[in-house]
Image (cartoon, rainbow, N blue to C red):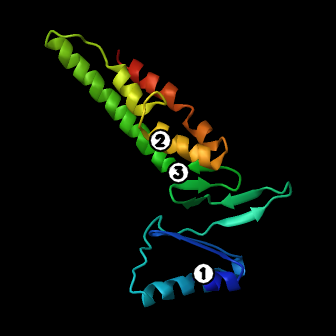
């Protein structure tokens, strides 16, 4: 694949089971069939279900910037032609887990109150798991490292609203 990509002035990247081919539109069919044939020759199966393969069209805009439709997704990140971000599905999963943990903590606080204990939601625990105040969580490890490596503000802007969302979830039904 690397030699075919070099011949057609294309880009071939592979990491584990993720493959990225970037080529001119006229080479798309040839590169795709070469990939499929290479996978067959190596006795590997190409999982081609929903969301597994996408064709993104990169165009250079008049201002010199790129546009990518639909956004390119590779190794947990998406690129729209201008900004690299963490995949929206990953952020959504993180927020679902956060909301679930808040609901559970509220339920436990109510149960402690009924048992004669203190009916306090343990915010410190939630902050440690779901905010920049924690030591080893999605925000402090993955997102911060990604932002530092990419050196752009797209990821920071993407995660900015989560603090307000955590507090909004804490205030509901109090």
Local secondary structure at mark 2: helix
Counting residues from the start of the chain, the first of labels 2 and 1 encountered is 1
The residue that appears at 56% across and 59% down in the rendered structure is 73
Task: Give the quarter of the image for residue 40.
Answer: bottom left
Counting residues from the start of the chain, the first of labels 1 and 3 encountered is 1
Using the image, tell me which numbered label, if any, was put on residue 2: 1
Count residues near mark 3 (Cα–Cα under 10 Å), then give few for <14, some for 14-19, many for 20+: some
Coordinates of residue 125 in the picture (x, y in percent): 34, 25
Local secondary structure at mark 3: loop
Q: CA distance from mark 2 to mark 3?
A: 16 Å
The residue that appears at 57% across and 83% down in the rendered structure is 1
Callouts 1 and 3 close, C-beta under 8 Å: no
Taking the image as shown, residue 29 lies to the left or right of residue 18, namely: right
Count residues near mark 2 (Cα–Cα under 10 Å), then give few for <14, some for 14-19, many for 20+: few
Count residues near mark 1 (Cα–Cα under 10 Å), then give few for <14, some for 14-19, many for 20+: few
Callouts 2 and 3 close, C-beta under 8 Å: no
- Circle 1 or circle 3, nearest the eye: 1
Taking the image as shown, residue 138 lies to the left or right of residue 120, namely: right
Coordinates of residue 94 in the picture (x, y in percent): 42, 41
Viewer-side residue, 41 vs 29: 41
Q: CA distance from mark 1 to mark 3?
A: 27 Å
Using the image, tell me which numbered label, if any, was put on residue 141: 2
Counting residues from the start of the chain, the first of labels 2 and 3 encountered is 3
Using the image, tell me which numbered label, if any, was put on residue 87: 3
The residue that appears at 38% across and 32% down in the rendered structure is 129
Coordinates of residue 34 in the picture (x, y in percent): 56, 86
Indicate whether 35 appears above or below 70: below
Coordinates of residue 86 in the picture (x, y in percent): 54, 48
Task: Give the quarter of the image for residue 59.
Answer: bottom right
Local secondary structure at mark 1: helix
Indicate whether 154 appears above or below 129: below
């Amino acid at each position: 694949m690397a030699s075919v990509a070099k011949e057609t002035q294309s880009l071939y990247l592979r990491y584990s089971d993720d493959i990225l081919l970037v080529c001119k539109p006229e080479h798309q069919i040839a590169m795709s069939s070469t990939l499929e044939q290479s996978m067959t020759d190596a006795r590997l199966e190409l999982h081609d279900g929903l969301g597994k393969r996408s064709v993104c069209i990169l165009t250079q805009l008049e201002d010199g910037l790129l546009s990518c439709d639909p956004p390119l997704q590779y190794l947990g990140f998406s690129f729209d032609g201008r900004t690299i971000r963490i995949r929206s599905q990953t952020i959504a999963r993180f927020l679902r887990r956060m909301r679930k943990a808040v609901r559970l903590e509220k339920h436990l606080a109510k149960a402690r109150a009924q048992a004669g204990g203190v009916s306090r939601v343990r915010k410190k625990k939630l902050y440690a798991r779901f905010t920049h105040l924690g030591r080893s969580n999605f925000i402090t490890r993955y997102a911060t490292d990604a932002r530092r490596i990419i050196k752009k503000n797209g990821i920071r802007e993407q995660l900015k609203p989560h603090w307000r969302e955590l507090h909004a979830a804490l205030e509901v039904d109090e």
